[in-house]
Amino acid sequence: MPLFKGPRMFALKHTLAAMTWGLLALAGTAHAVENGPVPTLADLKKDGPYAVTSQKVAGSGFGSGTIYSPNTAGKYALVAVCPGFVSAESSITDISRRLATHGFVVITIGTKTLLDFPSSRATQLLAALKTATTTTTGPVVGKIDTARQVVSGWSMGGGGTLEAAGITPGLKAAVAYAPWHSTTTKIKTSTVPSIIFGATGDVVAPVASHSQKFYDVLPTSTKKQLAVLQGSNHFFPNSAIEPVSYSNISWVKRFADGDTRYSQFLSVADPAWSKVQSNGPF
């Protein structure tokens, strides 16, 4: 005969589930992963200490993909990156490959069609993470820490990034470049640490109606930052432009790796920023 049944059994199950998630959270933050030497700002503005190798993967739930993985043995956080509306995978290659050289496995994707909207791109980002973690051939094998996964994207890919984070609380971080989305419904409940980059000259996804709006709706309890480039347009993520690139690296290092050595670079008073807003320090 069971000791508990009915409401008491439900309460017990709920308590045990909460305890399990709490223990997992503690395990995930028990220690930082410090990949690479002591960082300097000059180091972050160039390719990192890891030589990387790329491999093509067939799309499963997305169009196509390229995985960049460090040649050095070890376990690395995984980052999936999605391009924008009517844009090819190549549009986000430079900034994504730069990230990989600082000690990450990065998968860049081409979408099913160039016309896919943000919600579809959110789903495709999550599918890309699954593909990377289940790839059984090539240089990526054995190099992914599946407990540390991140989504990132540009334009509608950025909107998809914020949506993916909103529906996937287990992600460690989100990075959105000039994000575009028609709704904040699945963004406003996100608990995933999120950095959003905008540009004063962006007329495709103007900061006031997109980047700023998305930042504002994220809960105050969620780690978040908005950084706006002075003078740049919507296409700034098509290269490893600074200070976006080093801030991208620092955000993923800080929240996917738990490496607080990079916190200092998230509060740099760089003259290229028109505005920086956050609920840090981090």
Image: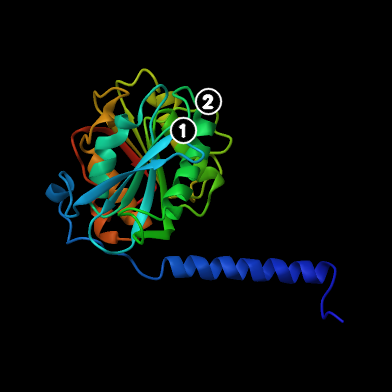
Q: Which residue is mark 1?
A: 159
At x 59% / y 69%, what residue is drawn? 20
Quarter of the image that includes the C terminus: bottom left
Query: In the figure, is residue 272 to the left or right of 172?
Result: left
Identify the residue at the far right of this view.
1
Against 220, residue 84 (above or below) is above
Residue 176, percent across and down? 39, 37
Residue 274, percent across and down? 26, 30
Kind of element beneath mark 2: loop
At x 22% / y 45%, what residue is drawn? 268
Q: Which mark is residue 80?
A: none
Count the marks. 2
Q: Which residue is mark 2?
A: 182
Against 273, residue 27 (above or below) is below
Quarter of the image that includes the N terminus: bottom right
Q: Amino acid at mark 2?
A: Ser
- The front one of 257 and 140 is 140
Residue 249, percent across and down? 27, 48
**Crowd around label 2: few <14 · some 14–19 · many ≥20 (10 Å):** few
